[in-house]
Amino acid sequence: MTALEINLETWAKGYNDTALSCLFMMNNYWYLCNNIRGTKLGDLMGTSRLCKYEQSTEYYAALYMRESWEKLLVFLCEEDLILFPGGRAIDRNLVKTRISVFCETFDDMHKKQSAWILPDKDLRRKTCRLIVEAIVPPYKSYVQRFTSGLEHVTERGYHNAESLENLIRSLFQPKLGNYSSSKCTDLIGIRNAAMKHLSSTPAAA
């Protein structure tokens, strides 16, 4: 199995997008762990190897979040919002700007990642839940704290917490037809897309 793990690392480096590379690794370690467990091969490999795959899945999930969605949180900072030390007045224009930039960046990220696929339903739900938990509560809290009395804050493309969550939960869905326009993050998808290197590693299936 070491050869397969090395191949996964090699394929992951072929992605120009770091977040997609992490998603690829997360998905494939999840696939290996869940398809080997309970089989004769899994028994031969032992519990320690399967635990290693579980740890790798969690590691790349955390790395994926750090390289993508968690970067949005920088736009929800409180720095410079208070106009006077010890006061309560806030810079309303700055609040609007930060929320606007957050939403625009979210939309761009969502559009890009809508082309990415996680075939396993359980992993797809788990990943979406991670994203929701990371950004929806902070965004909701920020909006509630700093937009009281601001007009049009829910207009001009701004999101509310519900719309953010709905968009996130629509991600990573399998697409009908061929995979040429989507980014496949599993071994089967890569094989169907005829990505390079796979033909030289028949043991990867």
Image (cartoon, rainbow, N blue to C red):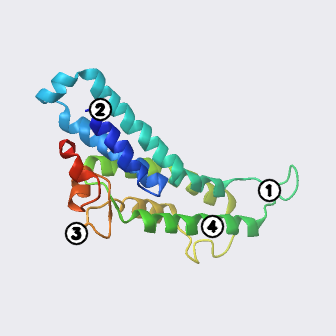
The residue where tag 3 is placed is 178
With respect to residue 155, does 127 lie above or below? above
Which one is closest to the eye, mark 1 or mark 4? Answer: 4
Task: Let me know if residue 120 appears in the view.
Answer: no
Residue displayed at 58% across by 78% down: 156
With respect to residue 139, does 201 lie above or below? above
* 185 left or right, relative to 37: right
Name which residue type carries label 3.
Answer: Asn
The residue where tag 2 is placed is 2
Contact between marks 1 and 2 (CB within 8 A): the answer is no
Mark 3 to mark 4 CA distance (whole Å): 34 Å
Which one is closest to the eye, mark 1 or mark 2? Answer: 2
The residue where tag 4 is placed is 101
With respect to residue 105, does 74 lie above or below? above
Name which residue type carries label 4.
Answer: Val
Query: At which x and y percent is residue 123?
Result: 30, 47
Disc 3 is placed on an element classified as loop
